[in-house]
Amino acid sequence: MKRLHKKIALVTGSSKGIGAAIAKQLAKDGATVIVNYSRGREEADRVVEEILQAGGRAHAVQANVGDALEVKALFKAIVHEHGHLDILVNNAGVYSTAPLAEIEEQEFHRQFNLNVLGLIQCTREAVGVFNPEGGSIVNISSSVTSFTPANSTVYTASKGAVDAITRTLANELGPKNIRVNSVNPGLVVTEGVHASGFFEDAFRQKIEAITPLGRIGKPEDIAPAVAFLASSDAGWITGEILVIGGGLH
């Protein structure tokens, strides 16, 4: 029997990149996956179709998880369709780079609204609909919280908050048998990284040169660890921050 057999999992921001890889991995391990997206219905549908063609179970649901009303509607739809939730992967996020002198208030709020507040809102709603036996939350943070690259002040701050929230909620929700962990990817090849400027050639070459395993990551490097933390195989693991960055910290 697959280790996530009969589990219901929500992966926020999973129409592409790391989120899509996580959705596919959870489905491969037996979960029924809700593929959440804010924009890009066609991309979300493609992820669902890939899962279905591989013999898995999935469907797409639109919601901007930075909007409290849309988050409530998302979880209402989950309860209507499935009755409960077992796994929440808080993957949705945004990022950009800028030197200190160019940081704008609007960009600060854009990143914190989704990366931090959106995560909190989804977690709050998930706790109310988890299976009575408990649940697993996996937050997708970033290795920037330990690597702290220049020109990433706002993004690094938002992901530092995610790390702190992970440990805090592990303490708060442990008595309910809800585990909370974080996976912190290093530089990974995704559409978003290309668009953000994180991927310009000089930066990529620098990262590859100082990474012990000598390369940047792929979404498929991240997904198996998330599936492990979501499963009963990690039943006595909570409050942990797992950096997956080829050895670079």
Image (cartoon, rainbow, N blue to C red):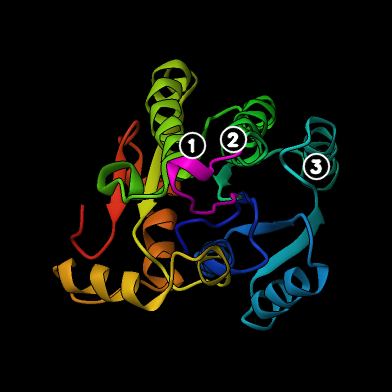
Determine the CA span between mark 2 and mark 3.
20 Å
**Mark 2 vs 1, N-terminal side:** 2
Q: Is residue 45 above or below residue 181?
A: below
| Residue 143 picture location, percent across and down | 33, 50
Would you say the residues marked 2 and 1 are in contact, meaning their CB atoms lie under 8 Å apart?
yes
Cα separation between marks 3 and 1 = 23 Å
Badge 2 vs badge 3, beta-carbon distance below 8 Å: no
Q: Residues within 10 Å of mark 2 (few under 14, many from 20)?
A: many
- Mark carried by residue 11: none
To which quarter of the image does residue 214 belong? Answer: bottom left
- Pointer 3 or 1: first along the chain: 3
Mark 2 vs 3, N-terminal side = 3
Q: Position of residue 197 (x, y in %)?
A: 49, 66
Whether 33 is among the magenta residues is no
Q: Nearer the viewer, residue 179 or 221?
A: 221
Quick one: which residue is furthest to the front in this view?
101
**Residue type of the residue flagged with mark 3:** Leu
Residue lying at 81% horizontally and 32% vertically, measured from the top left? 72
Quick one: SS at disc 1?
Answer: helix
- Circle 3 packing at 10 Å, graded few (<14), some (14-19), many (20+), is many
Residue at image position (49%, 36%) is 158
Question: Which amino acid is tagged 1?
Answer: Ser
The residue to which callout 2 is attached is 112
Q: Nearer the viewer, mark 2 or mark 3?
A: 2
Q: Which region of the structure is painted magenta?
A: 93-104
Q: CA distance from mark 2 to mark 1?
A: 6 Å
Question: Is residue 138 among what the camera can see?
Answer: no
| Residue labelled with disc 1 | 158
Q: Nearer the viewer, mark 3 or mark 1?
A: 1
Q: Main secondary structure of the magenta part?
A: loop
> How many discs mark residues in the rendered view?
3
For residue 74, the mark is 3
